[in-house]
Each structure stands twice: as structure tokens, then as C-alpha cells.
Image (tube, rainbow, N blue to C red):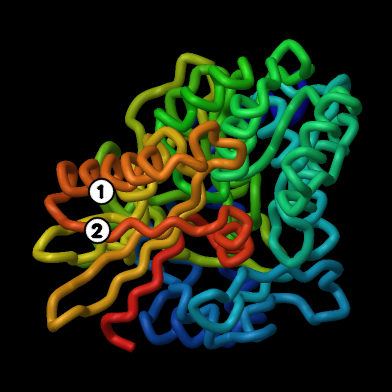
Amino acid sequence: MTVHQLSETMSKPDLSQLQIERLQTTLNRVYRNVSFYKHALDEHKIQIDTIRNLADIRNLPLTSKEDLRKSYPYDMFALPLRDVVRIHASSGTTGKPIVVGYSRNDLAHWADLVARELSWAGITDRDVVQIGFAYGLFTGGLGYQDGAEKIGASVIPASNQTAMSDLFTIMKDFKTSALICSPTTALTLARYMRSTGIHPEQLHMKRGIIGSEPWSESVRTEIEETFQIELFDSYGLSEIMGPGVSAECECHCGLHVNEDHFIVEVIDPKTLESLDEGDEGELVFTTITKEAFPLIRYRTGDRGSIIPGPCKCGRTFVRTSRITGRTDDLIMLQGAKVFPLQLLNTVHETKGIAPQCQIIISKTDGADAIEIRVAIESNYEHIDEIKILEKLRTDLGKSVKDRFGIGAKITFMEETTLINENRGKKQPVVIDKRYS
């Protein structure tokens, strides 16, 4: 049994003791080296030595995304820049990017945790892993590459910016056995595969890991049945580390949080009070091994819950539900409450329409108006038939009306145009012009 496996099956008392020891070390680090946390702890009159058990974490101040933006670029770093060996950043689509630093130990831990996640999905040193995430400041590409190389797999850094035909040529010729990408990329590949008549037997694919965006079980079913593979959900965010924060095991009954490196809570996003297991709210993470960029009770903005009880796999790490959306993206439209993810799922379920979409919200004559911009799938067999296109428009509009009670304008765009406009952004892309 490896060290990783020992950690994954630690008794709850031993795991709690490890967490509190690492938490106290982290608190001392941020108090000494990060002025934001020194001020926050002093303001709340918190003595670090009074944090003696995990329940005491509720007394610590929360950290928000806005706090990180205000620290741009390096004010939240707990190490001098000379000891930071890599820098990543969020996309910054809604403001300044959040800059994240890693020490050598941070990178080693990160590779270990991603390797752990890959092993949960059954990926070994005999696999050829094709990574369909963009490479650059985004953490997905390099994060998964380091983890895959850690377990000895062969890595293909294909990126999601490669043409569909070229991605499938790589899959066939290089004998890709595991695909790692976003749900949107996987769904686009699956539909391209069906439309061009590529049969799963022409490939060597066995499994896939998808993350970076919320996705539904209907998406899982479509991808698994098209590729004839087993699919695993993954969760991570740049501020906490990147991929490797939590992931599904072979039981597919929630995502195990790597609790030897992170403490997870769920809070009510309005009252900020901690919630019990099983209650849905906002996920909050505390890093307990990060050196360069440690975070205390970071509000992710992601909606989910902690699943009660042990997992059948035998791992003792707590499990969270799949992400159900964002706490900050509830849209009031024509008197209805709508989460953009719900609209995206409706788009995904409409045959003939590509996975990418934009949701444009505006005011027309003083009333809310919504436009859903979509594209016809590449090689869709009826693309030149106007009647078929109008049927697709009607079907999607009717589905939106039936499910949410709102009328929506459906606009078709070229798929390449929509992909280019959405590039680097999480799905669905929402542009609210009502207050601009």
C-alpha cells in the first residue's frame, strides 16, 4: 500500500488530527507573512492557539474572491517572490485576474494529488493521456500534465484549441486511452464523432476525466455511450490549487475531497452560517499544505453539499456532490428564477445544436429580454434545410418556455465564431446588459 493509499483510508480521528496540525501551521504562516490575514485575525480577536479542533474553524474569517482581486498581483503571497517557482492566474473575465503562486513543495503536492485523482479513475503508467485543456495561465493543462507524468503515463498536450479533425487523428494514431478535458469539449467531440461516422472501435479510449465546468448526468450518458468509455467528474479551481482538489472514485457517488490537503465546509451564502451534511450551500475551502498561496475559508461561489456517510470504495475522505451552479449567478428573468446552468442543460439536450452557447440578457421596452445564441453542430445532416433549422429554433424555444416559463429569442451563429468568442470562458457565457 502506497503512502497515498494510507492517507485515503486514514481513520477519521487520525485524519482530523493531521488536519488540525496542518491548519495551525498554515495559520501561523499567514499571520506572519500575509498582512491581509494578520489584520483579519486581529480584527476578529482570534488567537491562533485557540483553534484546537476542526469545529473551531468556523470562528475564522472568510476570504472572498474580491479580497484576492484587491491583493493583485502578489499581496496574498506568503513567500517572497524568489521562492515562488511558478505563477498561474484566473481568466479575469469579470475583473482583474487572481494571481496564484506555487513553491517547489506546492508543485510536488499538486502533482501528487492529480496523480491520485488519475489513479482513482484507473489511469496507470500504461495509459496514453490526451489533455484537452488550454495551456498557459489556466491551471488545467499543466496541472494534469504534471500529475499524469508523475504516474508514468504518456502525455499528449493536445489543447482544446486544436481542430476537431486533428484531435481525432491524434486519438487514432497515437492510441489515446484516456481523455481529460472540459464537458463542453467532450460533448463537442462526441457529436463530431457521431456526425462523421467514427466508431468507438476505431479508437483505443477507455476512460475520461472532465472538469472545470458544471455538467449534468445527461451529458455523462451521451459522452459515455458515444465513446463507450467510463467518465469521471473532477473539481478544482485555480485559487485553491487547480485540478486535484476533489474527484470521483470508481463508485461514482460523489467527489472525494483530498482532506489531507484541504478542509471543506458548506455555508449558507446569505447568513454565512455553517450548514450540516446534506444541506446545499456554498463550498468553502481552507488549504492546509500550500506554502506560497495559502487560503483560509475561501468562498468558492460554487453550490454543492457534503454527502453524509462513508463511500463503498473504503476511502475515508469526505465526499461532496457535483457542482449544481453558482451562488452568484441566479438570474431573475420575466419574474422567473433561472440558473444559467439550467439553460445550458436545455441546449445540450437539443439534438443538432452544438454545446457552446451565449446567453444575452437585455431590456426591451422596459421588459426583460433573453437571447440564446447557439450554433448548429458541424456536419449536421440537415444544416441546409431551412425548415429543419426553424424546427430546431422552435424546439429549443419551446423547451425553454416549458421549463422556465420565459420566452427566449434563439439566434444561430457560426460554430467557429461562437467558439472563438467563448474561448477561455466557462460555459455557459452570460452577458447581462440590463445594468450597463
Label 2: how many Cα within 10 Å (few below 14, some 14–19, many 20+): some
> Does residue 322 appear left or right of residue 136 in this picture?
left
Q: Residue at x 65, y 54 (%)?
A: 242
- Residue at disc 2, secondary structure: loop
**Residues under numbered marks 1 and 2 in contact, where contact means CB atoms less than 8 Å apart:** yes
155 and 397: which is toward the camera? 397
Q: Earlier in the sequence, mark 1 or mark 2?
A: 1
Quarter assignment of residue 378 = top right
Q: Position of residue 206 (x, y in %)?
A: 70, 18
> Farthest left residue?
335
Quarter assignment of residue 271 = bottom left
Q: Position of residue 326 (x, y in %)?
A: 36, 57
State the quadrant of the N terminus.
Answer: top right
Separation of disc 1 and disc 2 at Cα?
6 Å
Q: Residue at x 58, y 67 (%)?
A: 421
State the quadrant of the C terminus.
Answer: bottom left
Q: Position of residue 348 (x, y in %)?
A: 42, 39
> Does residue 247 appear left or right of residue 155 in this picture?
left
Q: Amino acid at mark 1?
A: Gly
- Residue at disc 1, secondary structure: helix
Q: Residue at x 77, y 18 (%)?
A: 203
Q: Which mark is residue 408?
A: 2
Q: Is residue 363 above or below residue 369?
A: below
Q: Amino acid at mark 2?
A: Ala
246 and 24: which is toward the camera? 246
106 and 419: which is toward the camera? 419
Q: Is residue 78 above or below residue 130?
A: below
**Residue marked by disc 1:** 397
Q: Position of residue 34 (x, y in %)?
A: 62, 81
